[in-house]
Amino acid sequence: NKWEPSWRTVALLSRPPSVLSHMGWSNPGQAGGAVKAPPGKWASSLATTARLANQSADGKRLCVAGASGSLELWNLDRDHRVFNVTLGQVKQVEATASGCLVLAQGEAKLVDARGQVKSLIHNAGAVSWGGNQALVAGDTQVNLYDGAGKLLRSWSSGPGVTALTRVEGRL
């Protein structure tokens, strides 16, 4: 793709500790750089089609956004692709307790383990997942959703929020 940066990282994984970048697989804790790719179909999918990926906190699931606009959820223990849906260009992806939270084409979406897509908000600028809740930045507000996509709370914000996270239970 002519618009892809020449240097990029697709995934930083905790289990096994590894990084996939434009230079291939490496272990951040090992001197000497390159390592053999992890075994499995999921690792092959990452290396060949992924643009972005995020591993769940427990290390058991992996959300993979492809260059073609696809979103895959992988069960890493079983080396099994759970779903593959098309969402368009994905800007951010977060693995949730059972699926994926994505920012795709300006819209925040929750995708459950069956591949069912729930739109949270249009004109979103950033998403973040933690504590089984989603934070989503819109044009003038930040919304907090539960794991099923139910709106729990909103805060006013300025325009143009592009990153957010929770710190010790706060925004």
Image: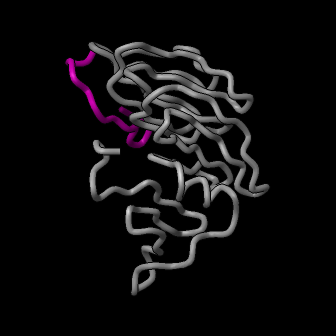
- The stretch in magenta equals 156-171
* Viewer-side residue, 126 vs 48: 48
Residue 98 left/right relative to 127:
right
Whether 108 is among the magenta residues is no
Q: Position of residue 169 (x, y in %)?
A: 44, 37
What residue is shown at x 56% (from left), y 77% (from top)?
36
Q: Is residue 119 above or below residue 162?
A: above
Task: Look at 43% across and 19% down and name the residue there.
Answer: 107
Farthest bottom residue? 32
Query: Taking 148 as reference, is 12 left or right?
Result: left
Instruction: Please indicate whether residue 72 sits to the left or right of residue 144 in the image.
Output: right
Relative to 157, say whether 37 is above or below: below
Location of residue 31 by image quarter? bottom left
**Nearer to us in this view, 48 or 166:** 48
Residue at point 50% right, 16% down?
120
How far across and how far down the image is residue 7, in percent? 29, 59
The percent coordinates of residue 15 (x first, y second) are 60, 64
Can you give x and y, in whole percent of width and height, for residue 41 in the image? 69, 58
Name the residue: 38% across, 62% down: 22
The chief SS type of the magenta part is loop
